[in-house]
Amino acid sequence: MTARPAAVLWDMDGTLLDSEKLWDVGVRELATELGHEMTDEIRHALIGASGDDAMRIIFTSLDIDPTPVAVQEAAEFLDRRVAELMTGPIPWRPGAKDALALVRAAGLPSALVTNTKRSLAEFGLDTLGRDFFDLSVCGDEVSRGKPEPDVYLRAAELLGVEPRHCVAVEDSPTGVRAAHAAGCAVLVVPCEIAVPDGPGRMFRDSLVGLTLADLERALLLRN
């Protein structure tokens, strides 16, 4: 017999919402503000990164002295710009809304688990709809963001389930590493960049046509 997941843990940017394109605008404008050009290589390294890691990657890659004042000003610029870009409906990723509805209709616990800070994630929840989730955990609500497992461990703890019985849905290498480190099964739906194959990872081209059997198979791969 196949086992149903104890919960489904959803990433947001690039997985449920096509919001990585908004972050792309923000980080490229930040690079210009800092007097540099954002290369595709640097941009790809930022996908899925936590706020602190993103600032470290930007300042290191652009060879800028990361003084506390400079880093704070850069973070505030990026927060303001992304908040502006996220005001109003954000495009969905293909099949994402139906996938959320499927999990909800099946009665499976569901959580939004994102590296995005709470103040910005709320814009995403305005589009997604909070009724799809039992709870949400954001990158600024744990000690360490993805690729560390903290957000996934916290979500499982709050739901009262074991991470190894959960399926995480992710689009980026950073997020996949976090979910795997937490012990979750991982359903990988790449968005902006490729995700390498690895143990316990099930791949789909999109969330279109996702079924409960797909989530059960992902859990079997983990076990």
Image (spheres, helix red, strand yellow):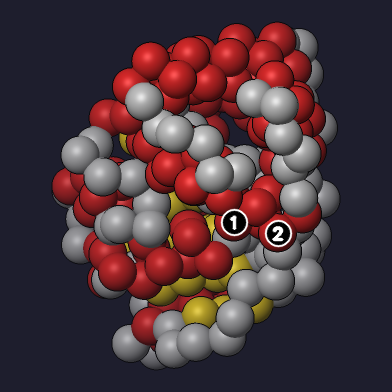
Amino acid type indicated by mark 1? Ala
- Residue hosting label 1: 45
Q: Is residue 167 left or right of residue 79?
A: left
Tag 1 near tag 2, CB within 8 Å: yes
Q: Residue 99 carries which label?
A: none
140 in relation to 152, above or below: above
Circle 1: element type: helix
Residue 62: percent from the left, percent from the top?
60, 43
Q: How many marks on residues?
A: 2
Rendering coords of residue 1 (x, y %)? 39, 89
Q: What kind of residue is marked 2?
A: Glu
Q: Is residue 168 positioned above or below 123 on the image?
A: below
Which of the 4 quarters of the picture holds residue 56? top left
Residue identifier under label 2? 41
Q: Quadrant for residue 178, please give it.
A: bottom left
Where is residue 40 drawn, in percent x and y?
Answer: 77, 54
Q: Which residue is drawn at 72% across and 34% down?
A: 36
Residue found at x 30% / y 57%: 148
Q: Distance between the residues labelled 1 and 2?
A: 6 Å
